[in-house]
Amino acid sequence: MRARLRGLITSGLLLMLFGPVGCSGEDHLPEARQHGSIVSQHIMGRELVTSKSEVRHILIAWKDLSSVYGAAFDSRAAGRSQEEAEKLVLQLLRRARQGEDFRKLMKEHSEDSTTASSGGSYIVSLTAPLGPEFTKMGMRLYLGEIGVVKSPYGYHIIKRVQ
C-alpha cells in the first residue's frame, strides 16, 4: 500500500514538473495560454500561504512596455512582442521547473537590472514596496514553487526560496 501511494505521489510530481509522458513544448504547463493569459492562476487563486517570503524572479518585458522603463529599457525587450515574451516565459518556466539553476537563468535572461546579474532576491510581505501582483504571487507560493505573474513591467517568473 505504501509503495503504491509513493508511486502515485511520485508520478503526480513528475506529471506536475514535466507534463504527460511523450509531450514536449509548453502547452501542457498549467500556465499554457488559457483564457488569454499565461499567469499561474492555480497559484494566484489560493489563499496566502505565508505572511513573509523571500523570492527570486526573472523579469521578461516586451516592446510595448518601453514607456514604463524610459532609458532603463532592456534592449532584449525592445525587439520582442508580447507573444514572443510569453513563449520565452513558458520555455524558461519549464526549464526552471525541471531543475535548471534558477540563478543562472536569472543572470542569462532576467531584465530586472537590480537582481539579474547578482541572482539576488526580494523579501515579500504585505508592506514591502513591490507591485501588488508580485506581492500576491510571492505570498501564495510554497517553498521551492515557481509561478508566473504579469505586472505593468512584464512577466515575472517567481521562485520562493525562503
Image (tube, rainbow, N blue to C red):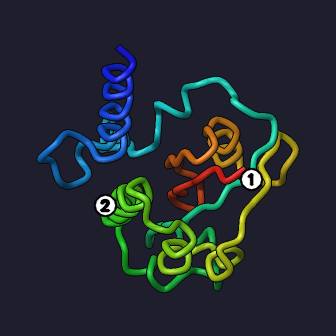
Task: Provide the residue designation for mark 1.
Answer: 54
Q: Nearer the viewer, residue 51 or 87?
A: 51
Q: Amino acid at mark 2?
A: Lys
Q: Quadrant of the N terminus?
A: top left
Q: Which residue is mark 2?
A: 87
Q: Are marks 1 and 2 in contact (CB under 8 Å)?
A: no
Please state which of residues 26 and 63 is positioned toward the viewer in this rendering. Answer: 26
Q: As drawn, is 131 to the left or to the right of 126?
A: left
Q: Amino acid at mark 1?
A: Glu
Residue that lies at the very extreme toward the left in this rendered image: 22
> Which structural element holds mark 2?
helix
Crowding near the residue tagged with mark 1, few <14, some 14–19, many ≥20 C-alpha atoms within 10 Å:
some
Reply above or below: 8 against 142: above
Q: Is residue 25 above or below residue 45?
A: below
Neighbourhood count class around disc 2 (C-alpha, 10 Å): few under 14, some 14–19, many 20 upward: some
Residue 104 image offset from top left, x and y in percent: 52, 76
Q: Position of residue 70 (x, y in %)?
A: 64, 79
Residue 4, which numbered label? none
Q: Quick one: 121 or 74, which is closer to the camera?
A: 121
Q: Of callouts 1 and 2, which one flags the residue occurring earlier in the amino acid sequence?
A: 1
59 vs 85, left or right, is: right
**x then y, percent, for residue 42:** 46, 30
Q: Quadrant of residue 113?
A: bottom right
Say which quarter of the image contains residue 145.
Answer: top right
Q: Secondary structure at mark 1?
A: strand
Q: Residue at x 44, y 69 (%)?
A: 62
Name the quadrant containing residue 143: top right
Query: Where does the image place residue 79, in percent across and percent down from the top left?
Result: 37, 80
Left or right placement of residue 28 versus residue 158 in this view:
left
Residue drawn at (53%, 50%) of the image = 150
> From what the image shows, is residue 30 above or below residue 76?
above
